[in-house]
Amino acid sequence: MRLNLTFLTGLAAASLSLGSANLQASLLTGDGACTTDSVHITSVSETGSGNSIFSGTPGIAATACAGMFAGANDDAQGGSNPDPNIGQLGDGFMNGQVIKGSSFDYFNFISPADLQDRDGDGNATDPGWVHLAHVDGEGNTAYSTMGEDGNELYLGDILNFAFCLTGPECSGTGGTWSLDVSEDSFELVTDILGPNAFDHLTFVFKAGSNLAVYDFDFTQLANGTLGINFTTAYSFEGTWNTGDFTNHKGNAQAISHMSVWARDPALPTRDIPLPSSLLLLMAGGLMLVMRRR
């Protein structure tokens, strides 16, 4: 399945500047060669009981992708290490940070109506993507921290993200991934001030000289394919491959690094009724919580 949502540069970049000097660069231009079947969800189970909700092969493909972006590198200039990592405009690759003169167009996966005011300046210009974890070419995982002003949350305390690169079923060009959440993190729900829910899970792959982004939109999946509810925590498993990243001989190239992001929407979001929007993060298996001021 091929789905290209890459926007062009030039006038489009200027129109999306939203008054920020951060976005006065051209937008990354892809060739439309990414494929949504490069990342799948193959299993969904209840975190506590282990009861299976979904299991299938090849599974559920990403709902959209953007790429391929030749020469792009989300790791450069701190693009995969945002701070304070709460989804502010220009803070990190997925939020349109300018990296070597170009920025990713976050409107590949959201609309202007999805923008929010995460920096408290009174303007809804913030895309809302939060960086969860980074995996290097050796399979080492580094978790991010989100928050500011003493309200930081180290995501490695509540997340377990595995991205398999070596082993019987894994290699540098394909393997499995999984995402689990500690049940202990749910105790923090009662202490949340202004709870938010993640509505997208997004993978950024870098291999060779190319980069591509693969997105799962839970506002679509929760209402159809998965058949999940919004009062239960889930764990996810899936597969990935670098079939989109081929060399001059047509062979898949080994991944050099990847990042996983989730988008934190304003509430209420779109047409998802409460309390579903408040608990959508549970449905996505990403119960990231923090105390807001």
Image (cartoon, rainbow, N blue to C red):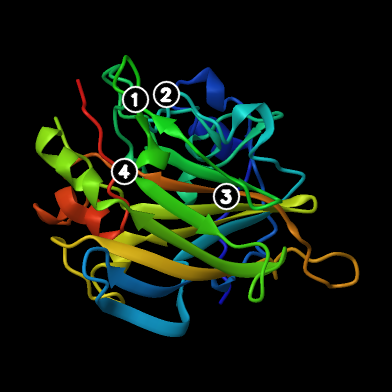
- Residues tagged 3 and 2 counted as in contact (Cβ below 8 A): no
- Give me the disc on residue 227: none
Task: Determine whether the residue tagged by mark 3 lies in a helix, strand or loop.
Answer: loop
- Give me the disc on residue 7: 3
Looking at the image, tell me whether mark 3 or mark 4 is earlier in sequence order: 3
Q: Is residue 239 above or below residue 30?
A: below
- Residues tagged 2 and 1 counted as in contact (Cβ below 8 A): yes
Task: Determine whether the residue tagged by mark 4 lies in a helix, strand or loop.
Answer: helix
- Give me the disc on residue 114: 4
Q: CA distance from mark 4 to mark 1?
A: 24 Å
Task: Determine whether the residue tagged by mark 2 lies in a helix, strand or loop.
Answer: loop
Q: Is residue 16 above or below residue 59?
A: above
The residue lying furthest to the right in this view is: 249
Looking at the image, tell me whether mark 2 or mark 1 is earlier in sequence order: 2
Q: Is residue 84 above or below residue 255?
A: above
Q: Nearer the viewer, mark 3 or mark 4?
A: 4
